[in-house]
Amino acid sequence: MLTRIKAFLISVSIAMGLVAIHTSVTNLLWLSSIDMPISIGIVISTIASDIIGMSFQGEVPVIALILIGLLIAFCTAGLLFKRATLSKPKLYALAGGTALLATVMLLSLALGSMDLIAGARTSLGRCIIILAGILAGYYFGVQLTKVANNEE
Amino acid sequence: MKNKIFALVLTLLISSGLAFSGGHDYKTEVVVDGLDHPWSIAFISDTHWLVTELSGGLRVVVDGQLDPNPISGIPKVFFTGQGGLSEVRLHPNFSDNKLIYLSFAALGSGEEKLNALVVIRGRLEGNTLVEIETILESYPLRKPAAHYGGRLRFMDDGTLLITSGDGFNYREKAQMLDNHFGKIVRVEDDGNIPDDNPFLNTAGALKDIWSYGHRNPQGLVISDDGTVFSHEHGPKGGDELNIIVPGNNYGWPAITYGVDYSGAIISPFSEQEGMEQPIKYWVPSIAPSSMLLYRGDMFPQWQGDLFISALVPGDVRRLEMDGQEVEDEEILWSKFGRIRHIAEAPDGSLILATDGSDGKLIKVSALK
């Protein structure tokens, strides 16, 4: 049980970290396009600040939204696993991607089409956020597979 | 000797009383209630006021009584989120031409609920607005119902300044001149383009743009020497008060003193060559919603001061000005909650409009 919880929390961290990096890169790329002086130091400090800021300092804590989304999605995937023909990594990857997509869409709907996560304002940006959920879900599925193999 | 001591003590007592009260002798009273999200006030006379409601009504107050019948003929507004009927402003020659100007959010054509900031003018004939003309429709359409700006001010030369917000989702477009997001626009009173606008000859630029790089400017005043002051909402922190010079770039979102509501950094920069600095900014945000430059006789000690109404948590900021510099800031009237608008009535009193569905007009007047 503890292993599963640990794996879940790490998958949340993976998703949050990737979403934060995506947000940072999106903003910095645009700033660079208008000739603002972007250095390696600024890239690193911005990414670090965004990981912390988006996790704990926002008006809406993004990490909490991701956690809730992944929890619902992974629980659903767990219930579906016995009927599914997909492996656990693939099933949970699908669940993770769906969770992140639902999170950004529901957030936008709740805020009257305002996209709180800047990286979610374009189709490409939303695809990247979905990919973050896929990777987080894939990691979780791999860990569950290891747990299941150890138990056998 | 005893008399001198008595006189000294009396002087000290009186001085301490004045210091305790801040030297302000005024009273506040609710003069109108029952307004639905009041947004802006215009004074036809000392006793005849127009008040916009975000929900779409243009209301009339006569002798302190709210007319139950709104002005008819107002176009349909997109009342959702921050959108709705916003500013009302009288033409400088209203006494002759009866023209009033309104800004509001309106739906575009099509089914996607895309919308825009629209400015119209019409002639007030009794209780009806007639001969309506469109002065501005912001370009392009937007999806969120947020960040419209919407303040209107006439300059001494008869041209009209209009603030236009960045539409929230389109903040980067504030740095581009081919759209109205994050701009202050200047047009003639009939909507035509003045021949001395700064970007008339800039390829690809909208010719009505006067300044750019704004977020959601909702304060706009012009001082007697022609200085244009404007304030704008920042994100999480970073509300700004700026002096607007035509053609200048006010930096949003390339430079800012705030961060995103998500906690993410919008820009790691707060200054950059070629982008203007505010003369004052607020962290945390106060959500400045309107501004006036006090010129009245009722409070002579406040002449020349800027008054800024604030939504968060809700008060009015009085800024003592020394020319174009802010010398001091005083927080006033924080017991009424969110203040959407502050206006100076013809008699020199101040009228505050509270925000919300149970909006009130509160009069600040001198104690007699």
Image (cartoon, coloured by chain):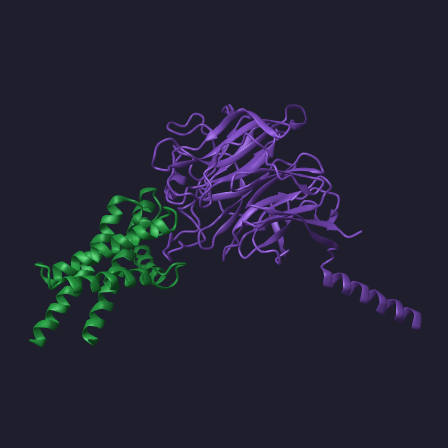
| Residue occupying the point 90% across, 69% down | B4
Chain whose colour in the figure is green: A
Q: Is residue A87 left or right of residue B80?
A: left
Q: State whether residue B231 is above or below residue B4.
A: above
Q: Position of residue A86 (x, y in %)?
A: 9, 59
| Residue occupying the point 73% across, 53% down | B26
| Residue occupying the point 16% across, 61% down | A92
Q: Position of residue B181 (x, y in %)?
A: 42, 38
Q: Is residue B324 left or right of residue A12?
A: right
Residue B179: name its quadrant.
Answer: top left
Residue B294: name its quadrant.
Answer: top right
Residue B57 is at least partly visible in this image: yes
Residue A39 is at least partly visible in this image: no
Q: Position of residue A73 (x, y in %)?
A: 22, 60
Q: State whether residue A111 is above or below residue B205.
A: below
Chain whose colour in the figure is purple: B
Q: Is residue B230 left or right of residue B330?
A: left
Q: State whether residue B156 is above or below residue B331.
A: above
Q: Nearer the viewer, residue B205 or B117?
A: B117
Total count of labels: 0
Quadrant location of the N terminus of chain B? bottom right
The extreme left residue here reads A152
Residue B52: name its quadrant.
Answer: top right
| Residue occupying the point 80% across, 51% down | B368
Q: Position of residue A83 (x, y in %)?
A: 10, 61
Q: State whether residue B94 is above or below residue B270.
A: above
